[in-house]
Image: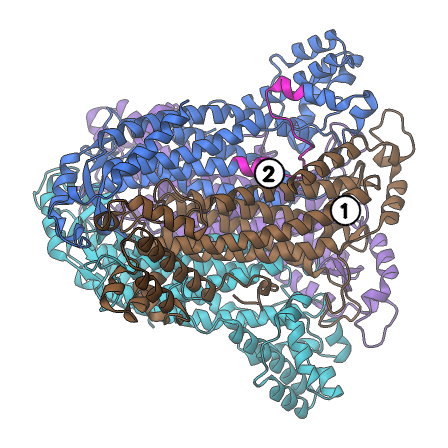
Chain colours: A blue, B brown, C cyan, D purple
Amino acid sequence: VSDLLEPGQHRSDRLDDAALWLAMGRVEVSWMRALVAHGIAGPRHLLAVTDAVQGLALPDDASVEAAGNPAVALVDALRSGLDEEPAGLVHRGLTSQDVVDTALMLLAGSALDQIQGSLGAVEQALAALAVLHRDTVMAGRTLTQYAVPVTFGLKAAQWLEGVLDAHESLAATRAALPAQAGGAAGTLSLLSETTTHPLAVVDTFVADLGLAPAALPWHTRRTPITRLAAALCETTNALGVIAGNVSLLGRPELGEVREGAQAGRGGSSTMPHKRNPVLTVLVRSAALQAPHLLAELNTASALAVDERPDGAWHAEWPTLRRLLVLTVTTADQAAELVAGLDVDPDEMARRADRAADDLLAEAPRATGDPRQYVGQAGVFVDRVLARWDQTRG
Amino acid sequence: VSDLLEPGQHRSDRLDDAALWLAMGRVEVSWMRALVAHGIAGPRHLLAVTDAVQGLALPDDASVEAAGNPAVALVDALRSGLDEEPAGLVHRGLTSQDVVDTALMLLAGSALDQIQGSLGAVEQALAALAVLHRDTVMAGRTLTQYAVPVTFGLKAAQWLEGVLDAHESLAATRAALPAQAGGAAGTLSLLSETTTHPLAVVDTFVADLGLAPAALPWHTRRTPITRLAAALCETTNALGVIAGNVSLLGRPELGEVREGAQAGRGGSSTMPHKRNPVLTVLVRSAALQAPHLLAELNTASALAVDERPDGAWHAEWPTLRRLLVLTVTTADQAAELVAGLDVDPDEMARRADRAADDLLAEAPRATGDPRQYVGQAGVFVDRVLARWDQTRG
Amino acid sequence: VSDLLEPGQHRSDRLDDAALWLAMGRVEVSWMRALVAHGIAGPRHLLAVTDAVQGLALPDDASVEAAGNPAVALVDALRSGLDEEPAGLVHRGLTSQDVVDTALMLLAGSALDQIQGSLGAVEQALAALAVLHRDTVMAGRTLTQYAVPVTFGLKAAQWLEGVLDAHESLAATRAALPAQAGGAAGTLSLLSETTTHPLAVVDTFVADLGLAPAALPWHTRRTPITRLAAALCETTNALGVIAGNVSLLGRPELGEVREGAQAGRGGSSTMPHKRNPVLTVLVRSAALQAPHLLAELNTASALAVDERPDGAWHAEWPTLRRLLVLTVTTADQAAELVAGLDVDPDEMARRADRAADDLLAEAPRATGDPRQYVGQAGVFVDRVLARWDQTRG
Amino acid sequence: VSDLLEPGQHRSDRLDDAALWLAMGRVEVSWMRALVAHGIAGPRHLLAVTDAVQGLALPDDASVEAAGNPAVALVDALRSGLDEEPAGLVHRGLTSQDVVDTALMLLAGSALDQIQGSLGAVEQALAALAVLHRDTVMAGRTLTQYAVPVTFGLKAAQWLEGVLDAHESLAATRAALPAQAGGAAGTLSLLSETTTHPLAVVDTFVADLGLAPAALPWHTRRTPITRLAAALCETTNALGVIAGNVSLLGRPELGEVREGAQAGRGGSSTMPHKRNPVLTVLVRSAALQAPHLLAELNTASALAVDERPDGAWHAEWPTLRRLLVLTVTTADQAAELVAGLDVDPDEMARRADRAADDLLAEAPRATGDPRQYVGQAGVFVDRVLARWDQTRG
């Protein structure tokens, strides 16, 4: 995770190699715990693995490449510190993909929790804006030109509705993040040799991790990945729309909604007066990146073959992590951006009045007052607020 | 819609310009019917519009470009044939985007119905294969090399599970396809001037079209589009996985599952003996295209600004239609492909026996018989079949 | 080619199925001409094929799908009308991919010619703007906020430089568009059986078509396709930048550069006063689509396997055509857009003066006059104009 | 740069934050050197800046985000350690984008050098294979099925031709990597206040960095970025084609070309006998990722507005770096892969003989020997080898 070229990524601190390595260790511990629970291994094996996992150093780069994935290095490292018997039970019945996929789902879970927290803050701030500006008239614009009047409350409510949509998708995805446990080719072959109730072992494993059970392994059926990606991209889309609008409305010629000032932020390397809308720009930048990551994950999904594909699975890893990091970062930046927005209702009013002829051109009888021609804006605001209220339980 | 470079697109015959034009006319008729239902217009206005819509020729290209969208040409054409009063009521309260978005949702609905029909056939065929080959052993392969044994029934079940996932997403999307009715800037401004119960008019309109109501206009909140696209891409992913596997398994060196022969299909322009897996290749080709269309629609979604964006909306149209056409075509081709698959269990068995040493290398005590080392394959098949059974109601 | 959802595509009239079918026929005629030139066939065979090609109806959709590409249908149609001997010589030594790839290159050539013509007009208009406004001061803007002053001439020159870059790439691509002639698996096997100088036949064929020779067949080495796509996308990028800027500068709050008014264009279906920047929006919309088409063609290129791939080749066809159509249309729209731009130097001046404090904040000693702080803007304009002048020969 | 999810990225060690930070420092030093060369600053200023750059710690994450890019933090850090006069001269006349863009071009230059070195090794190995197997017959395959015979030499030559194409593009891009120097809004405004020959300063700066001069700043004209990206993607495409073919040909059922064995590589976490084609899979995985990164950079390019865009520029950074890292890693892995390929000409011959009926079905008179029906394969090999020979100068 880099911060020079991805400013703000320190906001996403649970997705780096160290976090993944920990999660992979946790997968092996949970698996051993399940083996113990079903009498395949003994408590001392669990103790041994739990100990071994503690402070396990990251593997050297060459060994990860040599195996083509990081799970082999983990298993080797765990086994090397153990006696023969517990060593033979570590990872028994699993395959590399089980460990990597499940660890990525654990990371995704953590990321989704963080994103949902940030979205909650975004929603809170947008709801407050929608309430406060329920009747704040402003120029509506279509294809860049004046249309009929709208309210800033409606605009905030539309943004909120988009965020609620994304939040809903994220929550559904979060609840469905599955563990992966299939063994070498998705049949639980070795586990089935080891015990007469292999599916119960898997159930215990899944429950221990707090992930969702999968009816069967998904080594080559990547719906969990593409749905997760779709929910993340829905999120960056919704936040990108906010940022794109703030970027426009905060231009000096419009000046209706600006990113809030904060000491030390948005300075220029050469122009002292500058107050650049930094968060706005960064959120917008994220929204330009996410769709391509989504496409990559779908391409990979479509190319899954055999019982584990020859590259399509590997192509998912950096892309999924990048999409998670990007969305965590962006959602947190967006929360700060939206909470600090400077809204100028006077400027909105002045413009609406000046542009009244255009804004009211559609009206059967020009009332002369844009405030009187906002249709159902208020009702729509109320509907969104009601939905928001419900989602908060 | 072209067939020279998109072979098989004649299977998708409800998505061309004529179909869109009809759907747009239907939107205007439904709107007028809603106006009549709420006393804003009279039955003769509805009659007039219904008449005017009949056989309305496609607009000339230049007029569509001049307006930047096809709705203006439709409204002009409808109004030109009417007296002043009904002319004034046509489209009253709507905006171009209402007509185009709603018409596209009608087309999407029709496409989704067709796709779901095709997927039903795919599922039926896959379920039959899963049942028939529940215990047909074959070599499992990971990263192209032999892993442990699997069954062809499990492979078919995995394909089926992927299709069921997609079908589930399509059904949810189908049920939620919303109509669009917001007027010039999404406030229902003009309609609100025209009647005291504008939202009731919208409800009638939506019900008449058989689409889902939207809490508020979604001119710049494109979740309905991106979710639809995600479900379509999930479909091509699932079908692409089948095609990719058939492509591999049907190589002459493997010969385990081949696209079925059909007179006149798969010939070569130069080699008389050739039997090319045409449907396989076309389905796979579609799966390579869809993710990029999905990305485009998400990019467009993220760039929505103002009350109607300056290009992002327009960028959706051809891409969404192309994705619909592609998925309708592909699903229908896939249904034919899967129904006609030539499965060779003997070849599978021969290979599994020859490769038994590799396939059983993992097993604690080599049984010597790959059939005895398929773990939970049968249980997994049964789980998928149970899901399939449930979805059929 | 549709115009309802892709407004303006009638500007691109040489890329539809009929044009492709003609080009495919032309490929077969050129091939026969080459066979005749080298004594493999006789003049009457050429006459027979030339006759057969005339007015050959488009094939039925099912036959195209059955073969998986349109070349088989063409060859069948040509042969069916001929006696056995000329029939046997038609297409002799070629393969389907030779015909389709070469025909697509012919279409691409025609499209590139049209695009280059349009870009010439864009350049002419931009050069005129750069000259006229070489010293027209306006506010510079970075990250949406006022930076130092620039000139509109420099802005036009930057746009021009981008178009010249793209034009340069297009010209290089145009000159290098290769014919394809490799036979069944890229070895010219059958042709080599037929004549002792097969490569001379290919040379004659290529020269007759006016395409570039390829050192060897490129059935699975798709650099010609991806380079073509890159040049097309470079074009839409450059035009998209112009449109994006015009879209911003033409907002009513800025009003510095607007899309020119034209009777009947940019009307709204509900607001009579509206003058929507239709061409601007359509050009921008194209620029949002092209990168995804470029990605698809690169994905397909990366997935080429064997001597002809199992889907990756097919995935190119609709995408390449779509990218060609899009770029032809967009370049022509852009030519009209740029030629008709309404530039308001007074508004630029007023804004620059009003914003002088910000625009001059960087300057060591505020001159008070933005006109005096435009650095090397004039020199940069001259450099671009000099390049433009050179390219016109 | 992570290695757990991007195995092998330690092969790319010059593109991380530390390298970028160094490159940014180098840009500031070169700029000061140019100021000194033209009498704007004195040698002691250069000394001071050179000293200040040494061992400058990476900035804290929050300050990078606060500025929205890493250049402000660099300038602040440099200035803070200097007296007022040299501090005022550091970065004088530049803008953040000048520093970041130029530093990225320096990194790109280093990456391209490394990639070209790797490609040289790939070419050497492929050329050797093409020579050695010039007449090694094997089955040609189209659409997965047997076509006519080819030679493995031709296959290697085709791969080589693709790599040579990419190498050619990389070399052209390398030679044209431009420095960026435009000042706040691309006019060199402040520099023009500081000296009467600002363009000479820029020339000295560019020459000192060993980059190419740009006729004018390219802050919003991103051809250098998109062309670089296209060349990188052309590279991963060419390498992906090799890997895709090796993946197929190395399947146990084909066994004609396998990734070479290497102790400790390709092991499985559960199956001891496994020898997974790790490099093959990783190269293929990279080829699936690159097109999406290319698309992102083109999207960003198309969205450049004003004198510095509101997010499109920022969206380039992580994507360009990722594409560079990916290509460096992949090219190096590919060099190792290709150099170590196990080619089995006997297996090729056996298959060709067994499949002779199919492979010779096209031939006018079946010779019965596939070796006698390879057409111009040898000539094509020779052509590619001649090109390769030439490129080595």
Q: Which amino acid does label 2 sit on?
A: Thr
Q: Height in image: C235 above or below A339?
A: below
Callouts 2 and 1 on one subunit: no
Q: Which residue lies furthest to the right in this view?
A: B368
Q: Name the residue under label 2.
A: A223
Image location of residue D287, percent across then percent down:
59, 46
In the foreground, A385 or C256: A385
- In the image, taking residue B146 as reference, residue D4 lies left or right, namely left
Badge 2 element: helix
Residue C372, percent across and down?
11, 48
* Residue type beneath disc 1: Ala
- Residue in view at x 85 percent, y 47 percent: B345
* Category of crowding for the residue at label 1, using alpha-carbon neighbours closer than 10 angstroms: few (below 14), some (14–19), many (at least 20): some
Of all chains, the one bearing label 1 is B
Between residues B132 and B39, which one lies in front from this camera angle?
A: B39
In the figure, D209 relative to C271: above or below?
above
Residue where numbered disc 1 is placed:
B128
| Secondary structure state at the residue bearing disc 1 | helix
**Chain at numbered mark 2:** A
Can residue D15 be seen by looking at this rendering? no
Left or right: C276 with respect to B316? left
Return the x and y of residue B152 as percentages of the image width and height: 79, 43
Residue numbers of the magenta segment = A205-228
